[in-house]
Image: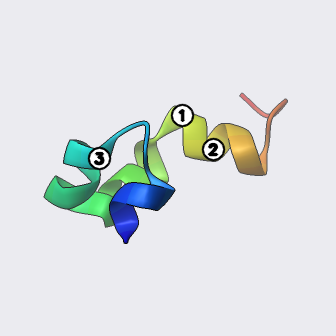
């Protein structure tokens, strides 16, 4: 259930979840909130 994990971008997650994980600002924010 990737859509559940990426509720903020359900469609994009289906198109390329691997790419989204690297380029998704929200996902990056979760790992390093004050790095960007």
Q: What residue appears at the point 32 percent right and 57 percent down from the top-left corner?
A: 19
Q: What residue appears at the point 43 percent right and 45 percent down from the top-left corner?
A: 7
Is mark 2 in CB contact (under 8 Å) with mark 3? no
Q: Label 3: which residue?
A: 10
CA separation in Å, label 2 and label 1: 5 Å
Circle on res. 25: 1
Quarter of the image holding residue 35?
top right
Q: Quadrant of the C terminus?
A: top right
CA separation in Å, label 1 and label 3: 15 Å
CA separation in Å, label 2 and label 3: 16 Å
Q: Residue furthest left?
A: 15
Position in image of residue 11 (x %, y %): 20, 45
Secondary structure beneath disc 1?
Answer: helix
Secondary structure beneath disc 3?
Answer: helix
State whether residue 33 is above or below residue 3.
above
Give the class, few, some or many, for how many residues have Cα within 10 Å of label 2's Cα (few <14, many ≥20): some
State whether residue 11 is above or below residue 13.
above
Give the class, few, some or many, for how many residues have Cα within 10 Å of label 3's Cα (few <14, many ≥20): some
Q: Label 2: which residue?
A: 28
Give the mark nearer the N terminus: 1 vs 3. Answer: 3
Is mark 2 in CB contact (under 8 Å) with mark 1? yes
> In this image, 30 relative to 22: left or right?
right
> In this image, 27 relative to 1: left or right?
right
> In this image, 3 relative to 34: left or right?
left
Give the mark nearer the N terminus: 2 vs 3. Answer: 3
Secondary structure beneath disc 2?
Answer: helix
State whether residue 13 is above or below residue 29.
below
Is mark 1 in CB contact (under 8 Å) with mark 3? no
């Amino acid at each position: 259930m990737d859509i559940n994990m990426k509720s903020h971008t359900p469609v994009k997650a289906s198109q390329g979840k691997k790419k989204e994980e690297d380029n998704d600002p929200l996902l990056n924010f979760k790992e390093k909130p004050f790095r960007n």
